[in-house]
Image: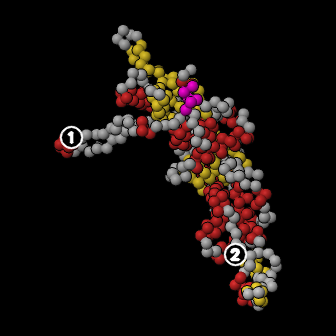
Amino acid sequence: MKDIRIQIDGTNFINNGDFTDQQIHQLAQIKLIKKYNKKNITGFKLAFVGCVELNDLVLVSLPYGITSKQIQGCTESKIRSLLVNVIKSIKQYTNKTDVVTSGKIAASFYLLDDLESNGLLTKFIKSDSTKDNGSINWAKTIKRNTPFKIGNTWGYTDFIRRGNINHETHELTMVHKWAIKEAFSLISLISDDYKIDIDDYETHLSESDIKEILFRLQPKLTKDRDIHVLDMIHQLINENDRFNISAIYTKNFNLIWEQALQNVLEHNQLLRDKIPNVLWNDISEVTNELKIKVKSEGGSPEVDIIFKVNDTLHVLDAKYYDLFNKGSRPGLTDLWKQFYYGQAYKAIFDTKELPNNGFVFPCFMPESSIFIKKFSTVNFSVNSESGEINNLTEIPAFVASINLVLDSYLHKKSLQKYYLEIIDI
């Protein structure tokens, strides 16, 4: 049984014997943890979200929005449910450079995906049999047996029938079965995608048996799929590299949080595209004369989430700050940016009212059915000449259930109506 350690992305921890020096070195080498020294106390900070396996240790890093107290109060099944959803979201971005899937975990996902698509590796060995089963091998029956006349035609008193050796005893199948069981065991903590009966993949082969069979079989294989599957099985039992790390993780989980919120709140990309583009229109005579470097490109503001219900616009900013452990909040630039999004869209659509504007932070809700709650407002005001405070607008700040958002995102469910219920209160 592997030792499982659960930490939170970006939070500090002191190594009180939880990690060996070698494991710390391995994690630091690929920049998954960062060392810090404060008041002569050396600690570490995680810098990823996902799951990393190091020898007998499984290190799980959960996203911001989850506190240590919340984890301690959770059942094992609830923690696993959250981790499964996190890994599913990371897997959505497997074509991105900021997502890493490597080692035994990568091999396990490959083998189980391949099994669902193609089944077990099998090799049927044909043989001839005179027993009364199988289809008739007419070519060999005609060649070997003498026919006799029945009326105006000819027939045979016996047939050579096709038989085959049961593929269950074939070594290639047995090795594949062992690998499926091993792969399923390796990722059962982080995935519930594969519905298989593990008893169907019992082989009673030891790891040394597998290595010996692979050594004999691999040079003889010619089919691409057989070669690839055996390569993945090799990866499952690879112990040559002591720095080999089995992992699936991302260092940019905020991208997944934004994408998940866009889907569950029904983000409208056509509305997003209506935001004005920003361009520099340099005066070439002046820039050439003064040798000012030309700046022609500009861009457009990155509105995270926008949608329209009836005649009301909703403009939301997906934020990924640690409200709980560090108490960090968005800076002034982010606050003003969201304020001006509201002003810009009001002008673009010539509406009387400002859009419903807001910030959305991740949170592990104490009740699984709750999607979103307003926890604060950001007030924008100016002082008038008379000394009175003129309130321009208030932008609400929400926390949304990371578990429910990820689950709904993966199952293509909308949570928009629950958000609308909250803002109408």
Look at the numbered disc 1 and give the secondary structure of its residue.
loop
Disc 2 residue type? Arg
The answer, for residue 239, to whether it is visible in the render is no
| Mark 1 closeness class: few <14, some 14–19, many ≥20 residues within 10 Å | few
Q: Nearer the viewer, residue 383 or 31?
A: 383
- Magenta-highlighted residues: 416-421
Q: Quadrant of the C terminus?
A: top right
Circle 1 is placed at which residue position? 283
**Residue 65 position by quadrant:** top right
Q: Residue at x 78, y 89 (%)?
A: 148
**Residue 128 position by quadrant:** bottom right
Look at the numbered disc 2 and give the secondary structure of its residue.
helix
Disc 1 residue type? Ile
Q: Residue at x 77, y 89 (%)?
A: 149
Please provide percent x and percent y for residue 211.
71, 69
Circle 2 is placed at which residue position? 216
Please provide percent x and percent y for residue 136.
74, 79
